[in-house]
Amino acid sequence: GGGRFSGRITVAFVMAGAIAKKLLGRLGIDVFAHTVEIGGIKARPKELAEIKENARKNPLWCADQEAAEKMARLIEKTREEKDSLGGIIEGVALNVPAGLGEPVFDNLDGELAKALFAVPAVKGVEFGVGFSVAGKRGSENNDPFIIKEGKIITATNNAGGILGGISNGMPIVVRVAIKPTASIARSQETVDIQKMTETSIAVLGRHDVCIVPRAVSGVEAMMALTLCDFAMRAGLIPGVIK
């Protein structure tokens, strides 16, 4: 894409997000993102600590090295076919205190989703187990509360760290669907609006076959900015820092 929908717009997001991550770090909040799927190839589920350690060990930001190699081969094959690929990015925020967000107009998951949709090519956002809740029963989806080391936590995290629009102290887990790049070299049908006739178009020049790895930092930044905003509203981060 180009213009307003160019991935270049995320440069400002990432710059601001880097500052937000520094501020959140003062509270012990850690935000990171990684690639979990490209073109139908899925990374194997891993523990959050393992994901954080391994996600930056390859250009695709995928914590599963074997899956990353398969993704890379598919990207190259798709490039030769003059086509593009989409995928899924997972964002994680650790050590977020309980109580951030409001139940109605300023709910935390709603504001996170709004910010994430500002990243070009984002077409879907889900929290926790996401849309799979539609096939679950309440007894399967509920996160039982337990006490561990003197703290109240949930035994599972199907909600993705947010209940009723408010953080519950568990890791915030969000997944973002990225569409295949629209600008491809393969010929496609379109229209000439001046002549009002049907024609074809093939986009030439340098265009990414898959923007998923490039969008990882954008997802991370928008999560950090939103959480920083809510932390400031809650008085956890002062308006003026000396």
Image (cartoon, grey):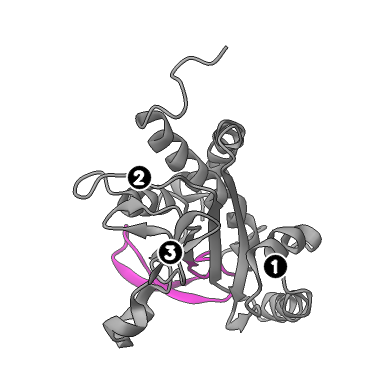
Q: Is residue 11 magenta?
A: no
Q: Which residue is mark 2?
A: 99
User: Which amino acid type corresponds to the residue marked 1 in the rendered image?
Assistant: Cys
> Which element is circle 2 on?
loop
Q: Which of labels 2 and 1 is toward the front? A: 2
Q: Which residue is mark 1?
A: 62
Q: Earlier in the sequence, mark 2 or mark 1?
A: 1
User: Which amino acid type corresponds to the residue marked 2 in the rendered image?
Assistant: Gly
Question: Looking at this view, is 106 or 123 the one in front?
Answer: 106
> Which element is circle 3 on?
loop
The answer to whether marks 2 and 3 mark residues whose Cβ atoms lie closer than 8 Å is no
Question: Looking at this view, is 234 or 21 the one in front?
Answer: 234
The answer to whether marks 2 and 1 mark residues whose Cβ atoms lie closer than 8 Å is no
Image coordinates for residue 36, horizontal then vertical, percent:
60, 71
Q: In this orientation, does residue 204 appear?
A: no
Marks 1 and 3, how far apart at CA: 20 Å
User: Which amino acid type corresponds to the residue marked 3 in the rendered image?
Assistant: Gly
Q: Residue at x 73, y 74 (%)?
A: 64
Image coordinates for residue 237, horizontal then vertical, percent:
47, 26
**Mark 3 neighbour class, 10 Å CA radius: few under 14, some 14 to 19, many 20 or more:** many
- Looking at the rendering, the stretch of residues picked out in magenta corresponds to 177-201
Question: Looking at this view, is 154 or 161 the one in front?
Answer: 154
**Mark 1 neighbour class, 10 Å CA radius: few under 14, some 14 to 19, many 20 or more:** many
Marks 2 and 1, how far apart at CA: 31 Å
Q: Residue at x 62, y 77 (%)?
A: 45
Q: Is residue 233 left or right of residue 18?
A: left
